[in-house]
Amino acid sequence: MVPWLLIAQVNYLWYAVPLIIAVSLVYAATRHEEIVPILMHAGRLALWITGFMAAIFIVLFLISWRL
């Protein structure tokens, strides 16, 4: 495989970072009105989303590894 193709595939993961930040901030802002609770809730939610995505990745990786 051409190394440039591998690098191009890894870059798709960077789209998840702003998406997680945006979803977390919008969801937290619908629950709170002050900035400090919004940021605290958004941080917890971002960690939860990242953990959930990592868990799904591990499950899919294990399933595909046995194929």
Image: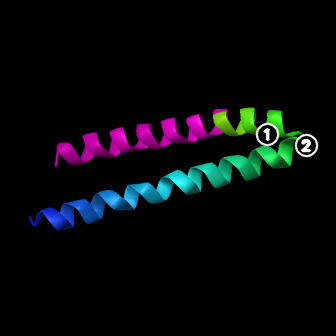
Q: Residue at x 73, y 32 (%)?
A: 40
Residue 35 image offset from top left, x and y in percent: 83, 40
Amino acid, disc 1 = Ile
Q: Residues within 10 Å of mark 2 (few under 14, many from 20)?
A: few
Give, as a single range, the part of the protein colored magenta.
Answer: 44-67
Q: Upstream in the sequence, badge 2 or badge 1? A: 2
Query: Main structural element of the magenta stretch: helix, strand or loop?
Result: helix
Q: Which residue is mark 1?
A: 38
Disc 2 vs disc 1: Cβ atoms closer than 8 Å? yes
Quadrant of the image containing the N terminus: bottom left
Residue 9: image location, x then y, percent: 28, 62
Within 10 Å of disc 1 (Cα), the crowding (few <14, some 14-19, many 20+) is some
Q: Residue furthest front?
A: 35
**C-alpha span from label 2 to label 1:** 7 Å
Q: Give the residue displayed 65% in from the left and 32% down from the top.
A: 44
Among the 4 quarters of the image, the one containing residue 43: top right
Q: Is residue 27 magenta?
A: no
- The residue at 38%/61% (across/down) is 12
Q: Secondary structure at mark 1?
A: helix
Q: In what element is the residue under mark 2?
A: loop
Place of residue 4 in the rendered image (x, y in percent of width and height, measured from the top left): 18, 66
Q: Where residue 27 appears, x then y in whole percent? A: 75, 49
Q: Is residue 55 left or right of residue 40?
A: left
Q: Is residue 10 left or right of residue 45?
A: left
* Rendered view: 65 above or below 2: above
Q: Nearer the viewer, residue 63 or 16?
A: 16
Three-letter amino acid code at disc 2? Glu
With 18 as the anchor, is 32 left or right in this view?
A: right
Residue under numbered circle 2: 33
Q: Is residue 4 left or right of residue 62?
A: left
